[in-house]
Amino acid sequence: CLARALLARPAILVLDDATSALDGLTEARVLDGLRRGLPDTAVLMICSKPASCAAADRVAMLREGRIAALGTHAELAERDPLYRDLLGLDRGAA
């Protein structure tokens, strides 16, 4: 449970698709609360929605179980074709 993890104030917190059922606004509020409430905690978020990575300091794009690209959300959105496709940035392009 996330509440128990927050009370423990861990050095590292792993969230496996913890915000997948939330709408964008609620997700942003939860992530902001984590940043403010646990400023010294390293948070590893596993996301199935690439847009959820926008608030991350760094994003690791995995392909076949290996890190294929590493950077900020903006960097990967600009240069990584698979990340762009997952975000829907190339849809409708000629």
Image (cartoon, rainbow, N blue to C red):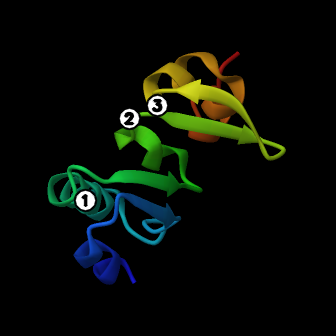
Q: Relative to 79, is 56 above or below?
A: below
Amino acid type, residue under disc 1 in the picture: Leu
- Give the image quarter of residue 9: bottom left
User: What is the number of the mark on residue 34?
Assistant: 1
Residue name at image x 48 percent, y 54 percent: 45
Picture quarter with the N terminus: bottom left
Residue name at image x 54 percent, y 17 percent: 78
Question: At which x and y percent is residue 60?
Answer: 59, 37
Residue that badge 2 annotates: 57
Question: At which x and y percent is residue 7?
Answer: 23, 77
Please, what secondary structure does the residue beneath circle 1 have? Answer: helix
N-terminal label among 1 and 2: 1
Can residue 84 be seen here? The reply is: yes
Residue that badge 3 annotates: 73
Question: At which x and y percent is residue 66?
Answer: 77, 39
Q: Relative to 48, is 53 above or below?
A: above
Can residue 91 be seen here? The reply is: no
Mark 2–mark 3 distance (CA, rounded to whole Å): 8 Å
Amino acid type, residue under disc 3 in the picture: His
